[in-house]
Image (cartoon, helix red, strand yellow):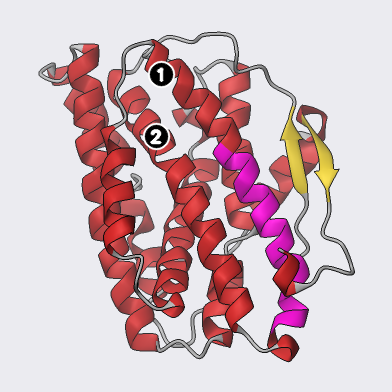
Amino acid sequence: MTELVVRKLLIDLSVPFPGRWCGGDAFRSAFFSALSMSFPVGEQYFIDSVRAGLKALSPEQAAPLAREVQGFVGQEATHRRIHTLFNDQLAALGYTNVLEQRVRRRLQRHAHFEVRIHVAATAATEHITAMFADWLYRHPEVLQDCEPRLQTLWMWHAAEEAEHCSTAFDIYRALDGSERWRGRMLRYVTLHFALDVLRQTVRNLWHDRSLFQWSTWRSGAQLLFARDGMVRGNARMWRAYLRADFHPRQQDTSHSRQWLQDNSARYSIVGQPSATSHPHHL
């Protein structure tokens, strides 16, 4: 069981920022903005899936997981709120979030699936975000030219993704989910997540009028496909999820723990799981 706390970022997102907020780089700004545009609807889906998964367990199975789920829900709800504020600034600049609309329609079509499928999809997505988090800590230069408050936003989010990466996975195992479906959901989520973010990135670049500039795609190739880029640099960790003996806690989260320790002045602790949490009250 992982002890999770809820943190409030001490940053002000009511102050506008430019469309090319990531060091003036068109691709990096458009790509990370596309990721942020996916978060509010995604975080709510994760919350709903994990809550439903916990409630589907027997009281004996759910009891040791209840406090962790409470912390998970608190962290994800905070991510949803802070990225909504970030996205509001993008909307004020004229960026249209079509990714969220597409994901909502897909979730509605799949709402009738059994709870284990939703928990498996959540576990797979949490693994992908934990991979990105680990990569971001290995490559802090990607955000080094950003405003400090925006650096704080992304590094804090990355740290908490690494912190709660095993919650949905453990619930899926407790639900006796099959290894075959766990692997299938990773492939499914990876495909749709990649296509959704790519399409939104292209739309963001079109709005920024940088879609057809050579420098835009040179930056994108470097970010994603360099030897240790976000895609190639995470291939081994992605494949590791498919092993039958895999568990998220096998991953090294020392970078995120260190960041939280070194940057404690940038957030306050607003909630910790209650020792009396009950699965059906989450």
Q: Is residue 74 left or right of residue 83?
A: right
The residue that appears at 70% across and 81% down in the rendered structure is 62
The quarter in which the N terminus is drawn is bottom right
Label 1 vs 2, first from the N-terminus:
2
Secondary structure state at the residue bearing disc 1: helix
Identify the magenta region.
Answer: 62-80
The residue that appears at 42% across and 9% down in the rendered structure is 18
Queried whether the magenta region covers residue 195, the answer comes back as: no
Up-down: is 21 above or below 231?
A: above
**Residue located beneath label 2 in the image:** 37
| 33, 240: nearer the viewer | 33
- Dominant secondary structure (helix, strand or loop) of the stretch shown in magenta: helix
Does residue 25 appear in the picture of this structure? Answer: yes
The quarter in which the C terminus is drawn is bottom right
**Residue located beneath label 1 in the image:** 90
Secondary structure state at the residue bearing disc 2: helix
Amino acid type, callout 2: Met
Give coordinates of residue 55: x percent, y percent: 62, 77
